[in-house]
Amino acid sequence: MKRSLILFISFLILVGFGSCEKEYILRTNPAEAKVVIEGLVTDKPGYHYIKLSRSTDFYSSGKTPRITDATVTVTDSDGVITEFVHNPNNDPDSMGYYKPVTPFIGVVGKSYKLFVLADGEEYEGEDTLYPVTTIDSLKYQINEDERADPEFPGRFYEVLIYTKEPQETRDYYLFNFYRNDSLTLNAPEDIYFTDDIALAEAINGITMPIFFSKGDKATVEAFSISREAFVFFNDLFNLINNDGGMYSPPPANCRNNLTNGALGFFRASAVTSMDIVVE
Amino acid sequence: MKHLSWGLIFSFALSMPALAQEKATISGYVRDAANGEELIGVTVYIPSLQTGTNTNAYGFYSVSLPQGSYTLQFSYVGYKSISVDIELSGNVTRNISMESEATYIQEVVVEDEAIDANVVDVQMSRNTIDVNQVKKLPALFGEVDIIKNVQMMPGVITAGEGTSSFFVRGGSADQNLILIDEAPVYDPSHLFGLFSVFNADVIKDSELYKGGIPARFGGRLSSILEVRTKDGNNREFHGTGGIGSMASRIMLEGPIRKEKSSYIVSARRSYADVFLRAANEDNLVYFFDVNAKANWRHNNNNRFFVALYAGRDDFSFSDDAGFSWGNATATFRWNHLFNDRLFSNTSLIASNFDYALEVFDPAQGLKWTSNLQELSLKNDLSYYINPDNEITFGYHITGRRFSPGKIKPNTSGSIFTTVELQKLYALDHAFYVSNRQRIGDRLMVDYGVRLSIFQQIGRSDIYLYEDPKDNTHVVRTDTLHYGPWENIKTYVNVEPRVGVRYSLRPGQSLKFSYNRMVQNTHLIASGTVPVPFNTWNPSGYYLKPQIADQFAAGYFRNFRDNTLEFSVEAYYKSMRNVTDFADNAQLFFNHDLSTEFRQGDSESYGLEFLLTKTKGRLTGMAGYTWSKTTRHIEGVNLGREFYANYDRRNVINITAAYEHSERWTFGATFTYSTGRPITLPEGKYEFGNYNPDVITERNGYRLSDYHRLDLSATLRQKVRPNRKWRGEWVFSIFNVYNQQNPFTIYTRTKQDDDGNIIGDGTEKEARLVYLFPILPSVTYNFTF
């Protein structure tokens, strides 16, 4: 919350003073392609995946190059090894995605080690699965300011979340919001995550960042994340929202839990979700 | 070193009795004949002895000579020189009134001989910002701003237009000590740098010291900007004001008791809603500042001053959020003459800088505040032994309290709870002594030393870490508890200061200086340009003092009877422990902030050329600087050397003012500089719904070169003999040829202006931000 406030103000400084913008064509030296690992294991079935790809030129479009022939395993803190295989259902949209061969579920309190062997190079990452608080309830209401001037006709309902934040533990969270089962961001540069330093126990009615129309189904998915993952998402947010280093620090690569120069993050999370239909 | 400085005082004290028998002292104050303002830095020259002195910051001079007859010449920029014949048989007090030259030229005027201070003074690397000259030049939105003029001096670099920060000889923006009547100003900007906190109407004198910094200054590595405000006309009541396109101001001054005491009050306010061009009309922004000062002369030996300054910026974004910040300072000062040769100034100074950020929302409402408070006692003495030796010495003590941040919920239903970063306390002591000594005909030396003792004190809890530099896995191993006033860490530093001037022949000299500067108050900011919500931290358990050693050498020459001043200076500055931060440092609200500190080395060197024309219809300056600044810090840019954010290889600045007639004056400024370094991506990758950049090198690229021309014309109303009211219109055009100078470049997913994604969301684009197009403005100024 504080981070986005600071960035909001920094951008306002930039934009608010009648500054102008125009497109600029970058002419930078292309970097060597790096391996990108995006991995998730959770305590519920259906969420786990390891996605392997490579970085590419700044101006390329479409999907980035996928790595389809790597060896991928996940080992838990008890020593149980699960192999992940590439695209087991031969789904054309799942190139680069590795799914567990055997049924697999994460357990709160365990830690998980990822091992990837791609093109003769080894990459490793480790994360711990922390518990997540449950969501008590959701409520919807009309947002009067948005109804007066909606960005999309009819879309002026907001959904409020009610939950309790455990005060005895230091927790970090990541959120996904869906409109009609489709992952939605308010702005392309938004990431919804927080630590709990400044949070009280009673979270009574924090609003989802997106609006809904009558008949829409609103879903919130809350993940527990580790401190390392929080640091990664914080760095990612700074990178995506950077202003070129004028008022904010110069852009830099994200700190992560992967070895051998890989980009991305291997995350273990507990997940809870709830939905409501706006009637 | 400590022993050496005491030795200096003793040796001069011992030599005194022998001198006292034959010598007598002439001393006094030099004032402006019209308004009684004391004049700073007036040259007092005795031709028969080829020696002299200058008035100090309070207009006081003192010369001890063998008894006899002398002529004293008083000269000062913008004033008619005066010669005074003295018969010196005993101590004499002689106060001098000097008349200012006409502000406009009615016909060709026979010019007084200009002074040669540029060549003769020991002081090098100092620029005087002449407010009267600045007023003739174009100004952004018509607001005369001395900081914009500071930014045009050789050796000074800016981050871009519309900012009030400046970078001097390789130093970052927080390495400048900005003083207004001796009180420090922590953030000199209004509206994020569009204007500065200095109201030009009340400024009497401003000096920028970039090198060869005298021993009486300390606390920052790279520069001292010393601004002194007027004391107020003690003869008659006057007012000055202006109505501009952005802000208006008024100043009133006058005697409280004629020639004994006077006051000066000024206020400036911007218009509430002129500005934000972001489509939102609900955004309001305004700033104000107020200066108030009074002084009274008890007798010739005692004078008292009280000065207050308060300024604030306030932003509100619809009803959703508000943001404000401000400086407030108060100074009480006592000038005391112990005798004709020993002048003392004692000041008590209080300063407060704070900001507040508030979000109004029933569930997510919060208020975030931070402040920095400082209380100082300073005692500065000048001992005018004889024309060949002037000793200055003194003692400063400052207590500081830093409150880095406190978050509080501002509604009962807010999800936030109260969190506070612990306060930090520091005690800062400095002792200094220096002597300005004339040796023979050609050599003048200013040598001295400053001893700084900086203590971080309690109450404070210091956390110890498994790895003090690991900012990802912060593991605290222990906490050290310190009680109130208990010493946590003390840093003692000796700062030698030496300046030498060698006269080659009249009108030409060589100068050399060496100084060591130490900085113990550090700005926690990782952007290039500081923003008001950056906080300051004292040196302490984890943060070491920053140290700079600067060598400078220069050749100074005046032409055409001192109407053209030329100098070329070369400098080399080596800095240790410059504060920088880990990549992606979390600087806001971090209880373990010390894990983000990365202190390292920085090096800067350069060559500066300056030509100034001070007299005639056409006045102005042209300067060229070549410089290079790099940093080398473990933990930043993978430990590789990188260009500093403000490294600009070539900078050219030209200002010119032309007095066309009694009614018209024209002004122009031109600036050119190499683009600043910028960090740009060399690729991208996919992560979740995002397309982050691949970064390989910090500051590996540069923005394109910056250049801009501004013009102005001032039209003065006809002077009516019996009317006190004088008005003038100032027409200014900023960025005359509409150059789109890049301010910064950032990247984002390809989207249209409303934020809708173009394409499938995988494409990226880079955007160049530029600030000001051609901007005309009109201001009406008046005096009465």
Image: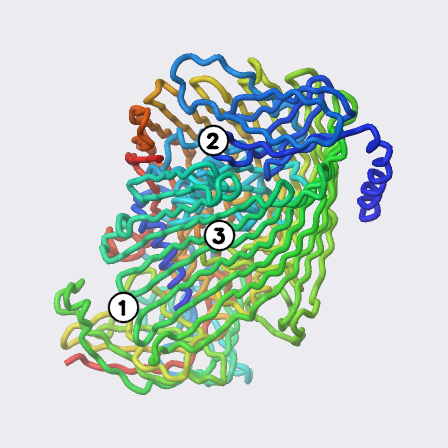
Mark 2 to mark 3 CA distance (whole Å): 24 Å
Mark 1 to mark 3 CA distance (whole Å): 53 Å
Residue type for callout 1: Thr
Earlier in the chain: of badge 2 and badge 3, it is 2
Q: Chain of mark 3?
A: B
Q: Could you say whether the residue bearing mark 2 is in a helix, strand or loop? A: loop
State the image coordinates of residue B384 (x, y, percent, origin top left): 73, 35
Q: Which residue is mark 3?
A: B308
Residue at image point 58% right, 21% down = B82
Q: Is residue A23 above or below residue A180?
A: above
Q: Which residue is mark 1?
A: A184
Which mark is on residue B434?
Answer: none
Pick the front one: B208 or B719: B719
State the image coordinates of residue A57 (x, y, percent, origin top left): 39, 49
Q: Please say whether residue B3 is visible from this viewpoint.
A: yes
Q: Could you say whether the residue bearing mark 1 is in a helix, strand or loop? A: loop
Q: Pointer 1 and pointer 3: residues touching (CB < 8 Å)?
A: no
Residue type for callout 3: Leu
Q: Pointer 2 and pointer 3: residues touching (CB < 8 Å)?
A: no
Pick the front one: B327 or A222: B327
Q: Which residue is mark 2?
A: B34
Q: In the picture provided, is B449 more to the left or to the right than A192? A: right
Q: Chain of mark 2?
A: B
Residue type for callout 2: Ala
Q: Is residue B103 above or below residue B326?
A: above
Pick the front one: B636 or B46: B46
